[in-house]
Image: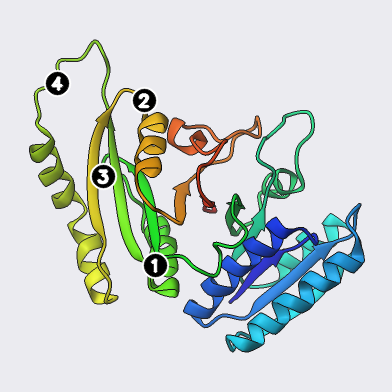
């Protein structure tokens, strides 16, 4: 298995690659540093690759650097290799008529998981002290929890799962916060056990909300998180399809959109 990080010479792709490096280090996997020729400065790309290669050596992570002439060459490479995860940075705004390189790559429907990083602070990738994972109610996949756990362990960071129950103005809602939190803890009990086996702890917080995105943004704004992990899905319109997936179009902190390969 290998981890891929895609670079274009920018600070955001460099930051995304540092997250990829910590991820690869924690799982003891080699790192492919890759670039596809385009409008980017090859001089800046090479400098970025050299810096990453030096950091990989410092952290004792096996790494290699390859430049491809076309996107098709890259996708062929990915299809032929045993890839665990692809890391890449992306623009803040998505556009149906002007898709980014990442959007085009994702919609190639490659049989691989993606970690798409939106970067606000380029200095935070080497220092992550608090990681948050927002979820809907008790809906949490093993894949998403695994990615979350890898970052928590890789950075030796504090961890929080933040659960949101969406309520509607027309609904009659009787459950108290304490009652609902107990229910969610019960539903997530296997993840608590797994975290204990991995020798780390996470806190669980819960809120009711009319607007999921607004509530999570408010929660992040009130707390000193360094990194957020958000489950995401692709759609034919190039947009993430659910409210909690889109809440970081204008993110408050560095955010990893996790897009798992789905059969």
In the image, taking residue 256 as reference, residue 143 lies left or right, namely left
Compare marks 4 and 1 and give the one earlier in the sequence. 1
In the picture, residue 93 is in which quadrant? top right
Dot 4 falls on a residue whose secondary structure is loop
At 72% from the left edge and 70% from the top edge, which residue is drawn? 80
- 3 or 2: mark nearer the eye: 2
Compare marks 2 and 4 and give the one earlier in the sequence. 4
How many angstroms separate mark 4 from mark 1 (CA)?
35 Å
Looking at the image, residue 55 lies above or below residue 140: below
Dot 2 falls on a residue whose secondary structure is loop
At 66% from the left edge and 34% from the top edge, which residue is drawn? 238
At 65% from the left edge and 88% from the top edge, which residue is drawn? 57
Q: Position of residue 189 (x, y in %)?
A: 17, 58
Looking at the image, residue 92 lies above or below residue 61: above
How many angstroms separate mark 2 from mark 4 (CA)?
16 Å
Compare marks 3 and 4 and give the one earlier in the sequence. 3
How many angstroms separate mark 3 from mark 4 (CA)?
18 Å
Q: Position of residue 181 (x, y in %)?
A: 15, 43
Q: Are marks 3 and 2 in contact (CB under 8 Å)?
A: no
Per the image, the residue denoted by label 3 is 138
């Amino acid at each position: 298995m290998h981890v891929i990080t895609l670079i274009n010479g920018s600070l955001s792709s460099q930051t995304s690659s540092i997250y990829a490096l910590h991820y690869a280090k924690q799982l003891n996997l080699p790192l492919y540093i890759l670039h596809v020729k385009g409008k980017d400065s090859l001089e800046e790309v090479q400098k970025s690759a050299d810096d990453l290669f030096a950091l990989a050596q410092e952290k004792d992570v096996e790494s290699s650097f390859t430049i491809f002439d076309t996107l098709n060459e890259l996708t062929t490479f990915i299809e032929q290799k045993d890839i665990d995860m692809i890391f890449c940075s992306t623009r803040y705004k998505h556009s149906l008529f002007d898709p980014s390189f990442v959007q085009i790559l994702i919609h190639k429907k490659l049989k691989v998981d993606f970690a798409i990083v939106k970067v606000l602070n380029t200095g935070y990738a080497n220092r992550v002290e608090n990681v948050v994972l927002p979820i809907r109610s008790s809906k949490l996949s093993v894949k998403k929890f695994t990615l979350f756990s890898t970052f928590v362990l890789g950075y030796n960071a504090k961890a929080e799962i933040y659960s949101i129950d969406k309520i509607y103005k027309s609904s009659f809602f009787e459950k108290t916060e304490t009652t609902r939190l107990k229910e969610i803890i019960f539903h997530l009990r296997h993840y608590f056990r797994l975290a204990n086996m991995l020798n780390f702890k996470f806190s669980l917080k819960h809120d009711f909300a009319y607007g999921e995105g607004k509530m999570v943004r408010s929660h992040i704004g009130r707390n000193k998180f360094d990194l957020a992990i958000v489950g995401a899905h692709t759609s034919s319109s190039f947009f993430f399809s659910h409210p909690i997936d889109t809440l970081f179009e204008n993110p408050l902190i560095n955010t990893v959109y996790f897009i798992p390969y789905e059969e």
